[in-house]
Amino acid sequence: MSVALALYCFSCRLEGVQALPVTVARRATSSCDDLSNCRTSSHIIWSCLATIFSCTWFAIHPNIPAPYESSLEVGLRRFGVFVMALIAPELVIMWAMKQWIASRRLAKKYHAKEWTQTHGFFAIMGGFMLVSGDKALHTLLPEELDELHTKGKIVFPRITEREILDKSKGDMISKAFVILQTSWFVLQCIARGVERLAITELELVTLAFAVLNLATYAFWWHKPQNVRRPFAVRLFNESPDQAVKGEEVPGMFNRAIDSIVHAWGGHYMDKMFLPLSPFGSMIVGGNFKRGATKVPSFFAGDTNENDDDMWPAALASATIATIFGALHCIAWSFQYPSHEIAILWRTCSLLITCLPFTLVFCAKLTAILDNLIGEHNIDGIVYGIVCIPFFAAMAVLIVSPFIYVAARVTLLVEAFLLLKTHHPDVFQVIQWTNFIPHV
Protein backbone atom coordinates (compact mmCIF):
# COMPACT_ATOMS: atom_id res chain seq x y z
CA MET A 1 0.00 0.00 0.00
CA SER A 2 2.85 2.39 0.84
CA VAL A 3 4.42 1.72 -2.57
CA ALA A 4 1.17 2.50 -4.35
CA LEU A 5 0.73 5.67 -2.28
CA ALA A 6 4.24 6.86 -3.06
CA LEU A 7 3.74 6.24 -6.77
CA TYR A 8 0.41 8.06 -6.68
CA CYS A 9 2.08 11.09 -5.06
CA PHE A 10 4.70 10.99 -7.79
CA SER A 11 2.00 10.91 -10.45
CA CYS A 12 0.32 13.89 -8.80
CA ARG A 13 3.55 15.85 -9.22
CA LEU A 14 3.44 15.03 -12.89
CA GLU A 15 -0.25 15.84 -13.06
CA GLY A 16 0.45 19.53 -12.85
CA VAL A 17 2.62 19.20 -15.92
CA GLN A 18 0.39 17.08 -18.07
CA ALA A 19 -3.01 18.39 -17.15
CA LEU A 20 -4.42 20.26 -20.13
CA PRO A 21 -7.92 21.42 -20.93
CA VAL A 22 -9.88 18.58 -22.40
CA THR A 23 -10.52 20.56 -25.54
CA VAL A 24 -6.80 21.03 -26.17
CA ALA A 25 -5.13 18.21 -28.04
CA ARG A 26 -1.92 16.67 -26.74
CA ARG A 27 -0.53 16.61 -30.24
CA ALA A 28 2.58 18.71 -30.68
CA THR A 29 5.61 18.45 -32.87
CA SER A 30 7.86 20.57 -30.68
CA SER A 31 7.57 22.99 -27.81
CA CYS A 32 11.17 24.02 -27.27
CA ASP A 33 12.23 27.53 -28.10
CA ASP A 34 15.91 26.66 -27.68
CA LEU A 35 16.72 23.70 -29.93
CA SER A 36 19.90 22.98 -27.99
CA ASN A 37 17.75 22.17 -24.96
CA CYS A 38 15.29 19.91 -26.77
CA ARG A 39 14.97 16.23 -27.40
CA THR A 40 13.13 14.67 -30.32
CA SER A 41 10.59 11.88 -30.63
CA SER A 42 13.19 9.63 -32.21
CA HIS A 43 15.52 10.23 -29.27
CA ILE A 44 12.79 9.18 -26.83
CA ILE A 45 11.91 6.07 -28.84
CA TRP A 46 15.48 4.86 -29.35
CA SER A 47 16.41 5.55 -25.73
CA CYS A 48 13.46 3.47 -24.53
CA LEU A 49 14.02 0.65 -27.02
CA ALA A 50 17.72 0.42 -26.16
CA THR A 51 16.93 0.27 -22.45
CA ILE A 52 14.17 -2.33 -22.88
CA PHE A 53 16.48 -4.44 -25.06
CA SER A 54 19.19 -4.26 -22.41
CA CYS A 55 16.67 -5.21 -19.72
CA THR A 56 15.48 -8.29 -21.60
CA TRP A 57 17.96 -9.67 -24.14
CA PHE A 58 21.18 -8.93 -22.25
CA ALA A 59 19.70 -9.67 -18.82
CA ILE A 60 18.74 -13.26 -19.70
CA HIS A 61 21.18 -15.90 -18.40
CA PRO A 62 20.08 -19.09 -20.23
CA ASN A 63 20.85 -22.65 -19.22
CA ILE A 64 23.45 -24.61 -21.19
CA PRO A 65 22.13 -26.13 -24.44
CA ALA A 66 22.61 -29.76 -25.47
CA PRO A 67 25.84 -30.60 -27.36
CA TYR A 68 23.92 -31.46 -30.54
CA GLU A 69 21.84 -28.25 -30.69
CA SER A 70 22.67 -25.86 -33.51
CA SER A 71 23.33 -22.16 -33.17
CA LEU A 72 19.99 -21.51 -34.91
CA GLU A 73 18.08 -23.50 -32.29
CA VAL A 74 19.93 -21.78 -29.45
CA GLY A 75 19.30 -18.34 -30.96
CA LEU A 76 15.61 -18.98 -31.62
CA ARG A 77 15.08 -20.30 -28.11
CA ARG A 78 16.73 -17.21 -26.66
CA PHE A 79 14.54 -15.02 -28.88
CA GLY A 80 11.50 -16.85 -27.52
CA VAL A 81 12.61 -16.16 -23.95
CA PHE A 82 13.17 -12.53 -24.97
CA VAL A 83 9.55 -12.24 -26.17
CA MET A 84 8.32 -13.89 -22.97
CA ALA A 85 10.40 -11.42 -20.93
CA LEU A 86 8.70 -8.54 -22.78
CA ILE A 87 5.24 -9.87 -21.89
CA ALA A 88 5.89 -11.22 -18.37
CA PRO A 89 9.26 -9.95 -17.07
CA GLU A 90 8.30 -10.83 -13.50
CA LEU A 91 8.42 -14.52 -14.43
CA VAL A 92 12.09 -14.06 -15.31
CA ILE A 93 12.54 -12.64 -11.81
CA MET A 94 10.89 -15.75 -10.34
CA TRP A 95 13.13 -18.02 -12.44
CA ALA A 96 16.24 -16.10 -11.36
CA MET A 97 15.17 -16.10 -7.71
CA LYS A 98 14.58 -19.86 -7.62
CA GLN A 99 17.99 -20.47 -9.18
CA TRP A 100 19.55 -18.10 -6.66
CA ILE A 101 17.96 -20.03 -3.78
CA ALA A 102 19.04 -23.41 -5.16
CA SER A 103 22.60 -22.22 -5.91
CA ARG A 104 23.04 -20.90 -2.37
CA ARG A 105 21.89 -24.24 -0.98
CA LEU A 106 24.40 -26.11 -3.17
CA ALA A 107 27.19 -23.75 -2.19
CA LYS A 108 26.54 -24.51 1.48
CA LYS A 109 26.16 -28.25 0.89
CA TYR A 110 29.46 -28.55 -0.99
CA HIS A 111 31.38 -25.94 0.95
CA ALA A 112 33.95 -28.59 1.92
CA LYS A 113 34.68 -29.09 -1.79
CA GLU A 114 35.26 -25.33 -2.14
CA TRP A 115 32.08 -24.70 -4.09
CA THR A 116 30.80 -21.15 -4.37
CA GLN A 117 27.43 -19.86 -5.50
CA THR A 118 28.87 -19.71 -9.01
CA HIS A 119 29.44 -23.49 -8.81
CA GLY A 120 25.83 -23.89 -7.70
CA PHE A 121 24.54 -21.87 -10.66
CA PHE A 122 26.83 -23.80 -13.02
CA ALA A 123 25.50 -27.16 -11.77
CA ILE A 124 21.84 -26.08 -12.01
CA MET A 125 22.23 -24.82 -15.58
CA GLY A 126 23.61 -28.20 -16.72
CA GLY A 127 27.30 -27.45 -16.37
CA PHE A 128 28.54 -31.01 -15.78
CA MET A 129 28.41 -33.61 -18.55
CA LEU A 130 29.30 -37.29 -18.09
CA VAL A 131 31.76 -38.27 -20.81
CA SER A 132 33.19 -41.64 -21.83
CA GLY A 133 36.00 -41.40 -24.30
CA ASP A 134 34.91 -38.84 -26.85
CA LYS A 135 31.20 -39.41 -26.32
CA ALA A 136 29.02 -37.07 -24.24
CA LEU A 137 26.64 -39.31 -22.31
CA HIS A 138 24.28 -37.17 -20.20
CA THR A 139 24.05 -34.18 -17.89
CA LEU A 140 24.96 -34.68 -14.25
CA LEU A 141 23.25 -32.89 -11.40
CA PRO A 142 25.03 -32.69 -8.00
CA GLU A 143 23.10 -35.67 -6.59
CA GLU A 144 24.30 -37.95 -9.38
CA LEU A 145 27.81 -36.53 -9.10
CA ASP A 146 27.83 -37.63 -5.46
CA GLU A 147 26.43 -41.04 -6.34
CA LEU A 148 28.99 -41.78 -9.07
CA HIS A 149 31.83 -40.45 -6.92
CA THR A 150 30.77 -42.68 -4.03
CA LYS A 151 30.74 -45.71 -6.36
CA GLY A 152 34.23 -44.81 -7.56
CA LYS A 153 33.17 -44.30 -11.17
CA ILE A 154 34.30 -40.67 -11.40
CA VAL A 155 36.49 -38.16 -9.66
CA PHE A 156 34.38 -35.38 -8.18
CA PRO A 157 34.95 -32.46 -10.56
CA ARG A 158 37.46 -29.90 -9.39
CA ILE A 159 36.89 -26.68 -11.27
CA THR A 160 37.58 -23.26 -9.84
CA GLU A 161 35.23 -20.31 -9.90
CA ARG A 162 37.62 -18.49 -12.21
CA GLU A 163 37.54 -21.40 -14.70
CA ILE A 164 33.72 -21.35 -14.67
CA LEU A 165 33.58 -17.59 -15.20
CA ASP A 166 36.06 -18.00 -18.06
CA LYS A 167 33.32 -19.92 -19.88
CA SER A 168 30.89 -17.03 -19.39
CA LYS A 169 30.28 -14.61 -22.26
CA GLY A 170 29.45 -11.82 -19.81
CA ASP A 171 31.90 -10.51 -17.23
CA MET A 172 31.41 -8.14 -14.31
CA ILE A 173 32.24 -5.10 -16.46
CA SER A 174 29.58 -5.88 -19.10
CA LYS A 175 26.99 -6.54 -16.39
CA ALA A 176 27.93 -3.34 -14.58
CA PHE A 177 27.62 -1.42 -17.86
CA VAL A 178 24.03 -2.64 -18.39
CA ILE A 179 23.15 -1.80 -14.79
CA LEU A 180 24.69 1.65 -15.23
CA GLN A 181 22.64 2.24 -18.38
CA THR A 182 19.37 1.22 -16.76
CA SER A 183 20.17 3.12 -13.57
CA TRP A 184 20.83 6.24 -15.64
CA PHE A 185 17.41 5.88 -17.28
CA VAL A 186 15.75 5.52 -13.86
CA LEU A 187 17.61 8.60 -12.62
CA GLN A 188 16.43 10.64 -15.63
CA CYS A 189 12.80 9.67 -15.00
CA ILE A 190 13.10 10.68 -11.34
CA ALA A 191 14.76 13.97 -12.30
CA ARG A 192 11.98 14.78 -14.79
CA GLY A 193 9.43 14.19 -12.05
CA VAL A 194 11.31 16.48 -9.65
CA GLU A 195 11.52 19.22 -12.31
CA ARG A 196 7.85 18.69 -13.20
CA LEU A 197 8.68 17.78 -16.78
CA ALA A 198 6.31 15.46 -18.61
CA ILE A 199 7.30 11.92 -19.48
CA THR A 200 5.67 9.61 -22.00
CA GLU A 201 3.84 6.39 -21.28
CA LEU A 202 6.57 4.54 -23.17
CA GLU A 203 9.14 5.91 -20.73
CA LEU A 204 7.03 4.66 -17.82
CA VAL A 205 6.91 1.19 -19.37
CA THR A 206 10.68 1.33 -19.83
CA LEU A 207 11.13 2.53 -16.25
CA ALA A 208 9.26 -0.56 -15.02
CA PHE A 209 11.54 -2.81 -17.09
CA ALA A 210 14.61 -1.00 -15.74
CA VAL A 211 13.57 -1.53 -12.13
CA LEU A 212 13.02 -5.25 -12.73
CA ASN A 213 16.33 -5.48 -14.56
CA LEU A 214 18.17 -4.35 -11.43
CA ALA A 215 16.52 -7.18 -9.47
CA THR A 216 17.28 -9.73 -12.20
CA TYR A 217 20.98 -8.86 -12.23
CA ALA A 218 21.06 -8.94 -8.43
CA PHE A 219 19.91 -12.58 -8.43
CA TRP A 220 22.01 -13.66 -11.44
CA TRP A 221 25.13 -11.66 -10.62
CA HIS A 222 27.19 -14.81 -9.95
CA LYS A 223 25.61 -16.91 -12.72
CA PRO A 224 27.73 -17.51 -15.86
CA GLN A 225 26.09 -16.11 -18.98
CA ASN A 226 25.66 -17.79 -22.38
CA VAL A 227 27.84 -20.82 -21.62
CA ARG A 228 27.70 -23.17 -24.62
CA ARG A 229 29.78 -26.15 -23.45
CA PRO A 230 29.60 -28.02 -20.10
CA PHE A 231 32.52 -29.29 -18.05
CA ALA A 232 33.47 -32.89 -18.97
CA VAL A 233 33.35 -35.44 -16.14
CA ARG A 234 35.05 -38.63 -17.36
CA LEU A 235 34.25 -42.20 -16.39
CA PHE A 236 36.92 -44.48 -14.92
CA ASN A 237 37.84 -47.79 -16.59
CA GLU A 238 34.90 -47.82 -18.93
CA SER A 239 35.13 -47.80 -22.69
CA PRO A 240 32.68 -45.87 -24.87
CA ASP A 241 31.07 -49.14 -25.98
CA GLN A 242 30.38 -50.23 -22.40
CA ALA A 243 28.93 -46.92 -21.32
CA VAL A 244 25.22 -46.28 -21.69
CA LYS A 245 24.56 -43.18 -23.72
CA GLY A 246 22.10 -40.70 -22.27
CA GLU A 247 18.65 -39.98 -23.65
CA GLU A 248 18.75 -37.35 -26.35
CA VAL A 249 16.22 -34.61 -25.69
CA PRO A 250 14.19 -33.80 -28.85
CA GLY A 251 15.13 -30.59 -30.63
CA MET A 252 13.24 -27.35 -30.13
CA PHE A 253 11.22 -27.70 -33.34
CA ASN A 254 10.30 -31.34 -32.62
CA ARG A 255 9.24 -30.43 -29.07
CA ALA A 256 7.07 -27.61 -30.39
CA ILE A 257 5.41 -29.90 -32.95
CA ASP A 258 4.86 -32.61 -30.31
CA SER A 259 3.25 -30.06 -27.98
CA ILE A 260 0.90 -28.84 -30.70
CA VAL A 261 -0.07 -32.36 -31.75
CA HIS A 262 -0.61 -33.44 -28.14
CA ALA A 263 -2.75 -30.38 -27.35
CA TRP A 264 -4.76 -30.63 -30.57
CA GLY A 265 -5.64 -34.25 -29.95
CA GLY A 266 -6.24 -33.84 -26.22
CA HIS A 267 -8.71 -32.09 -23.96
CA TYR A 268 -10.09 -28.71 -24.98
CA MET A 269 -8.29 -27.19 -21.99
CA ASP A 270 -4.99 -28.29 -23.52
CA LYS A 271 -5.86 -26.41 -26.71
CA MET A 272 -6.88 -23.32 -24.75
CA PHE A 273 -3.70 -23.17 -22.68
CA LEU A 274 -1.32 -24.04 -25.53
CA PRO A 275 -0.31 -20.37 -26.19
CA LEU A 276 0.45 -19.95 -22.45
CA SER A 277 2.38 -23.20 -22.05
CA PRO A 278 5.82 -21.51 -22.29
CA PHE A 279 4.87 -19.20 -19.42
CA GLY A 280 3.74 -22.21 -17.41
CA SER A 281 7.11 -23.85 -18.05
CA MET A 282 8.84 -20.75 -16.73
CA ILE A 283 6.75 -20.84 -13.54
CA VAL A 284 7.14 -24.57 -12.90
CA GLY A 285 10.75 -24.70 -14.05
CA GLY A 286 10.51 -28.18 -15.48
CA ASN A 287 11.69 -31.51 -14.10
CA PHE A 288 15.06 -32.93 -15.04
CA LYS A 289 14.90 -36.53 -16.24
CA ARG A 290 18.02 -38.42 -15.23
CA GLY A 291 19.91 -39.47 -18.33
CA ALA A 292 18.94 -36.42 -20.41
CA THR A 293 21.60 -34.51 -22.30
CA LYS A 294 20.41 -31.10 -21.10
CA VAL A 295 18.36 -29.53 -18.34
CA PRO A 296 15.00 -27.88 -19.20
CA SER A 297 15.23 -24.31 -20.45
CA PHE A 298 13.79 -22.88 -17.21
CA PHE A 299 15.18 -25.48 -14.82
CA ALA A 300 15.89 -24.04 -11.37
CA GLY A 301 16.82 -27.02 -9.24
CA ASP A 302 14.43 -28.82 -6.90
CA THR A 303 12.85 -25.71 -5.32
CA ASN A 304 9.44 -26.72 -6.68
CA GLU A 305 9.50 -29.79 -4.43
CA ASN A 306 10.20 -27.75 -1.29
CA ASP A 307 7.42 -25.48 -0.02
CA ASP A 308 9.93 -23.76 2.25
CA ASP A 309 11.56 -22.37 -0.89
CA MET A 310 8.68 -22.28 -3.38
CA TRP A 311 6.21 -20.06 -1.57
CA PRO A 312 8.68 -17.43 -0.31
CA ALA A 313 10.01 -17.19 -3.87
CA ALA A 314 6.46 -16.83 -5.20
CA LEU A 315 5.64 -14.11 -2.66
CA ALA A 316 8.84 -12.21 -3.39
CA SER A 317 8.20 -12.46 -7.14
CA ALA A 318 4.62 -11.27 -6.64
CA THR A 319 5.90 -8.28 -4.65
CA ILE A 320 8.31 -7.32 -7.43
CA ALA A 321 5.58 -7.88 -10.04
CA THR A 322 3.24 -5.63 -8.07
CA ILE A 323 5.85 -2.86 -8.05
CA PHE A 324 6.27 -3.41 -11.80
CA GLY A 325 2.54 -2.93 -12.35
CA ALA A 326 2.29 -0.03 -9.91
CA LEU A 327 4.87 1.91 -11.91
CA HIS A 328 2.40 1.93 -14.81
CA CYS A 329 -0.12 3.55 -12.46
CA ILE A 330 2.05 6.68 -12.34
CA ALA A 331 0.32 7.61 -15.61
CA TRP A 332 -3.08 7.52 -13.88
CA SER A 333 -3.41 11.32 -13.89
CA PHE A 334 -1.89 11.88 -17.33
CA GLN A 335 -3.94 13.62 -19.99
CA TYR A 336 -5.11 11.21 -22.71
CA PRO A 337 -6.59 11.86 -26.16
CA SER A 338 -9.91 10.39 -25.04
CA HIS A 339 -11.63 9.17 -21.92
CA GLU A 340 -11.81 5.63 -23.32
CA ILE A 341 -8.04 5.43 -23.76
CA ALA A 342 -7.54 6.73 -20.22
CA ILE A 343 -9.89 4.06 -18.83
CA LEU A 344 -8.09 1.37 -20.87
CA TRP A 345 -4.65 2.36 -19.52
CA ARG A 346 -5.85 2.60 -15.92
CA THR A 347 -7.72 -0.70 -16.07
CA CYS A 348 -4.77 -2.60 -17.55
CA SER A 349 -2.39 -1.00 -15.05
CA LEU A 350 -4.60 -2.07 -12.14
CA LEU A 351 -4.89 -5.59 -13.52
CA ILE A 352 -1.14 -6.19 -13.80
CA THR A 353 -0.70 -4.64 -10.34
CA CYS A 354 -3.30 -6.74 -8.55
CA LEU A 355 -3.18 -10.08 -10.38
CA PRO A 356 0.27 -11.31 -9.16
CA PHE A 357 -0.74 -11.51 -5.49
CA THR A 358 -4.20 -12.77 -6.51
CA LEU A 359 -2.62 -15.67 -8.40
CA VAL A 360 -0.29 -16.56 -5.52
CA PHE A 361 -3.20 -16.43 -3.04
CA CYS A 362 -5.43 -18.61 -5.20
CA ALA A 363 -2.63 -21.11 -5.84
CA LYS A 364 -1.96 -21.44 -2.12
CA LEU A 365 -5.68 -21.68 -1.36
CA THR A 366 -6.24 -24.49 -3.87
CA ALA A 367 -3.23 -26.38 -2.48
CA ILE A 368 -4.55 -26.13 1.08
CA LEU A 369 -8.11 -27.09 0.15
CA ASP A 370 -6.92 -29.96 -2.05
CA ASN A 371 -4.90 -31.39 0.83
CA LEU A 372 -7.85 -30.86 3.16
CA ILE A 373 -10.23 -32.79 0.91
CA GLY A 374 -7.72 -35.58 0.24
CA GLU A 375 -6.52 -36.16 3.79
CA HIS A 376 -9.79 -35.88 5.72
CA ASN A 377 -12.17 -37.57 3.25
CA ILE A 378 -14.68 -34.75 3.55
CA ASP A 379 -18.16 -35.39 2.15
CA GLY A 380 -21.69 -34.11 2.42
CA ILE A 381 -22.42 -30.47 3.25
CA VAL A 382 -18.87 -29.79 4.41
CA TYR A 383 -17.55 -31.04 1.08
CA GLY A 384 -19.87 -28.67 -0.76
CA ILE A 385 -18.78 -25.74 1.39
CA VAL A 386 -15.09 -26.50 0.81
CA CYS A 387 -15.57 -27.00 -2.92
CA ILE A 388 -17.06 -23.53 -3.45
CA PRO A 389 -13.84 -21.60 -2.66
CA PHE A 390 -11.76 -24.37 -4.29
CA PHE A 391 -13.46 -24.14 -7.66
CA ALA A 392 -13.67 -20.34 -7.42
CA ALA A 393 -9.91 -20.17 -6.89
CA MET A 394 -9.37 -22.63 -9.75
CA ALA A 395 -11.49 -20.45 -12.03
CA VAL A 396 -9.35 -17.43 -11.14
CA LEU A 397 -6.17 -19.43 -11.85
CA ILE A 398 -7.52 -20.45 -15.25
CA VAL A 399 -8.80 -17.05 -16.38
CA SER A 400 -6.20 -14.71 -14.84
CA PRO A 401 -3.21 -15.66 -17.06
CA PHE A 402 -5.17 -14.78 -20.21
CA ILE A 403 -6.29 -11.47 -18.68
CA TYR A 404 -2.77 -10.66 -17.54
CA VAL A 405 -1.13 -11.34 -20.92
CA ALA A 406 -3.85 -9.33 -22.69
CA ALA A 407 -3.32 -6.40 -20.30
CA ARG A 408 0.47 -6.48 -20.76
CA VAL A 409 0.21 -6.54 -24.54
CA THR A 410 -2.38 -3.74 -24.46
CA LEU A 411 -0.11 -1.50 -22.36
CA LEU A 412 2.86 -2.11 -24.67
CA VAL A 413 0.83 -1.30 -27.79
CA GLU A 414 -0.88 1.69 -26.20
CA ALA A 415 2.46 3.11 -25.00
CA PHE A 416 3.70 3.27 -28.60
CA LEU A 417 0.42 4.57 -30.02
CA LEU A 418 0.31 7.42 -27.48
CA LEU A 419 3.64 8.68 -28.83
CA LYS A 420 1.59 10.37 -31.56
CA THR A 421 0.04 12.69 -28.97
CA HIS A 422 2.82 14.26 -26.97
CA HIS A 423 2.52 16.84 -24.25
CA PRO A 424 4.72 19.86 -25.18
CA ASP A 425 6.92 19.50 -22.08
CA VAL A 426 7.94 16.01 -23.20
CA PHE A 427 10.54 17.57 -25.50
CA GLN A 428 12.24 19.65 -22.82
CA VAL A 429 15.49 18.24 -21.48
CA ILE A 430 16.54 18.08 -17.84
CA GLN A 431 18.57 21.01 -16.56
CA TRP A 432 21.03 19.09 -14.42
CA THR A 433 22.60 22.31 -13.13
CA ASN A 434 19.42 22.86 -11.09
CA PHE A 435 20.43 19.89 -8.91
CA ILE A 436 23.89 21.32 -8.14
CA PRO A 437 23.99 23.45 -4.97
CA HIS A 438 25.05 26.98 -5.84
CA VAL A 439 24.74 30.52 -4.53
Image (tube, rainbow, N blue to C red):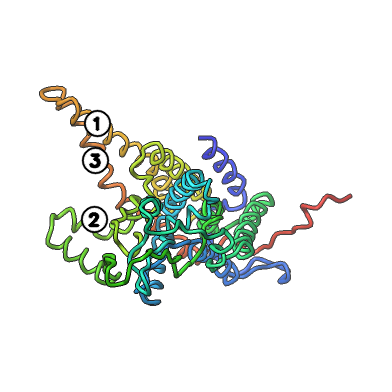
Residue 411 x/y as whole percent: 42, 57
Residue where numbered disc 1 is placed = 369
- Up/down of 68 relative to 144, above or below: below
Which is more toward the observer, 161 or 182?
A: 161
- Up/down of 2 relative to 277, above or below: above
Residue where numbered disc 2 is placed = 273
Residue where numbered disc 3 is placed = 394
- Up/down of 367 relative to 267, above or below: above
Which is more toward the observer, 81 or 63?
A: 63
* Sooner in the amino-acid sequence: mark 2 or mark 3: 2
Residue 144 x/y as whole percent: 36, 53
Question: Is 299 on the left-hand or right-hand side of 323?
Answer: left
Question: Which amino acid does the dot numbered 2 rest on?
Answer: Phe
Q: Locate residue 417: give its quadrant.
A: bottom left
Local packing at callout 1 (Cα closer than 10 Å; few below 14, some 14-19, many 20+) is: some
Question: Is 240 on the left-hand or right-hand side of 226?
Answer: left
Residue 115 x/y as whole percent: 53, 51
- Foreground: disc 2 or disc 1: 1
Question: Is 165 on the left-hand or right-hand side of 142?
Answer: right
Question: Is residue 333 visible from the viewing direction of this image?
Answer: no
Q: Locate residue 364: give its quadrant.
A: top left
* Disc 2 from disc 1: Cα separation: 24 Å
Question: Which amino acid does the dot numbered 1 rest on?
Answer: Leu
Secondary structure found at label 1: helix
Q: Which mark is residue 357?
A: none
* Sooner in the amino-acid sequence: mark 3 or mark 1: 1
* Disc 3 from disc 1: Cα separation: 11 Å
- Residue at the image point whose x is 65% and y is 59% from the top: 184
* Disc 2 from disc 3: Cα separation: 14 Å
Tell which residue pokes out farthest to the right in this image: 439
